[in-house]
Amino acid sequence: MSKFYITTPIYYVNDEPHIGHAYTTIVGDVLARYHRQKGDDVFYLTGIDEHGAKIAESAKEHNMDTQKFCDQTAAKFMNAWQALDISNDFFIRTTNKDHKDVVSKIFQTLHDKGLLEEKEYEGLYCVGCEKFLTERDLVDGKCLDHKREPDTLKEKNWFFKLEQFLPKIQELIESDTIQILPVTRKNEVLGLLKENVMKDFSVSRQKTSVAWGVDLPFDDNQVSYVWVDALSNYITAIGYPDDMDKFKKWWPADLHLLAQDILKFHAIYWPAFLLALDLPLPKTLFIHGFFTINGEKMSKTIGNVIKPQELIDKYGVDATRYLLLSQFPFGQESDIREDHFVERYNADLANGYGNAVARVTTLIEKNNLQIVINKETTWIDSLAKDYNNYRFDLVIKNIMSKLQELDGYITTNEPWKIEDEKKLVEVLSHSANELWLISQGLLPFMPNIAQQVLDILEAKQIKKAPPLFPRLVDNANDAN
Ligand code: MSP
């Protein structure tokens, strides 16, 4: 048995959970469940990022105390993940006292090691991005993402001596000691390292400009830059440094999932902090692209943000997870087309899986047959290749081909016409065993319904399954 420690990014608490967050979190969940199914010892971490000027600003806009505002949105994230059946082992909040204490300790260690240096910083700071921008990032003097002019900030900050770690980081990435996937993203990071653009950078902010953050133990006027605080979540969540037994059990992370916008922080800053703390490095970072919705960038202004609950209300939890992950290869920039969801739902789930389960279990109950499920799992093992390549769309495709084969088998053998009991048992036993395998395959994607089918099939006497996926009316296609 091996251990598997997997994380999602911690999401900014001033956003409401949307389908972009949900996608990453479902992928993490499918992997966590797949590894548990294989018998691995799994720790799946997700959570929220609660500090920084942007969050304090949002709270103010809502006329709320900042901590109360965080508590309220934290609950929205926790509820969304519960509704999506996310099986995370912990939910980290960066306003947890334990987390904050450790971030302070980390700063003290960096300070004691002479890795922090006080310097004057002047720059264009976008509160929306939570970072300093360069002139190059601006269009008409404004931040492209937030359509606002950045503030000019001049202040004394603590700088982290990043540059001394860069040659080592480059070597670790080149040799895949830290594996960055897909390989185009690895090359992107190596490009940054070779261009010499990564410099020592400021890891603290003056309290006068950002007050909502973790205090520095050696400087009353400064708080932690939000990214040091945020990245540390991956180790504070598993006990660093107060419960070293727990920490050593899980660290290093086997997999950090993230999107391209936060690649630099995870592939360069994070390894540098870990090297500075003499800690092992994460094994793999998997970077996925950004989603658009019906061809457009997801944005509150356009008003096309899809909340996970809207999909759950329409399709149910299991189908929502399935439909999102079956649409396109994970890793690429992709367009979520909700108009394809109904069609896919009806084809794969209502007419496909649901119908096959109904047909087979109805015939078994009607004929009062004793069917033995032999639980032979060789075929399940064959899904490993696509899982290892993070191709969840192909895992699903493989499972669906098996379902189509079974459909063909049932159509050819017409069990409803078979009179010879021995032959009938043979055909339905084969069908039930195939359905058992298909359900095992679907279990990480559809944890409720696949489990329900497994329970029906494994019962002493197989009973007719209740309707699993009611057929939906395809408004989008009907209109055409
Ligand atoms: N708080 C930081 C992460 C700190 S991790 C130590 C942050 N938060 S975020 O909420 O803005 O975005 C985090 C992640 O959300 C992205 O990496 C990505 O996983 C997911 N996504 C947010 N919007 C998305 C899309 N439109 N498409 C795909 N993923 C998106 O950055």
Image (cartoon, rainbow, N blue to C red):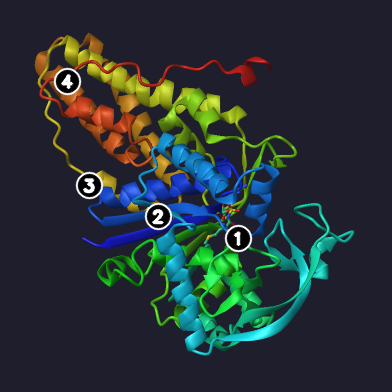
Name the residue carrying label 4.
462
Task: Answer with mark 2 or mark 3, whichever residue precedes in sequence.
Answer: 2
Residue 198 seen in the figure: no
Q: CA distance from mark 4 to mark 1?
A: 58 Å
Residue 45 - label: 2
Q: CA distance from mark 2 to mark 4?
A: 38 Å
Task: Answer with mark 2 or mark 4, whichever residue precedes in sequence.
Answer: 2
Disc 1: CA contacts within 10 A as few (<14), some (14-19) or many (>=20): many
Q: Position of residue 138 (x, y in %)?
A: 83, 62
Residue found 51% across the figure and 23% down from its top: 314
Residue 127: image quadrant is: bottom right
Q: Secondary structure at mark 2?
A: strand
Q: Is residue 163 left or right of residue 89?
A: right
Q: Secondary structure at mark 4?
A: loop
Q: Is residue 475 above or below residue 28?
A: above
Residue 18: image quadrant is: top right
Q: Is residue 2 above or below residue 291?
A: below
Q: Secondary structure at mark 1?
A: loop
Q: Is residue 162 above or below residue 306?
A: below
User: Are discs 4 and 1 less than 8 Å apart at CB?
Assistant: no
Q: Position of residue 473 (x, y in %)?
A: 54, 15
Q: Could you say which is closer to the camera, residue 72 or residue 363?
A: 72
Q: Amino acid at mark 2?
A: Leu
Residue found 32% across the figure and 19% down from its top: 411
Q: Is residue 136 above or below residue 64?
A: below
Q: Amino acid at mark 4?
A: Ile
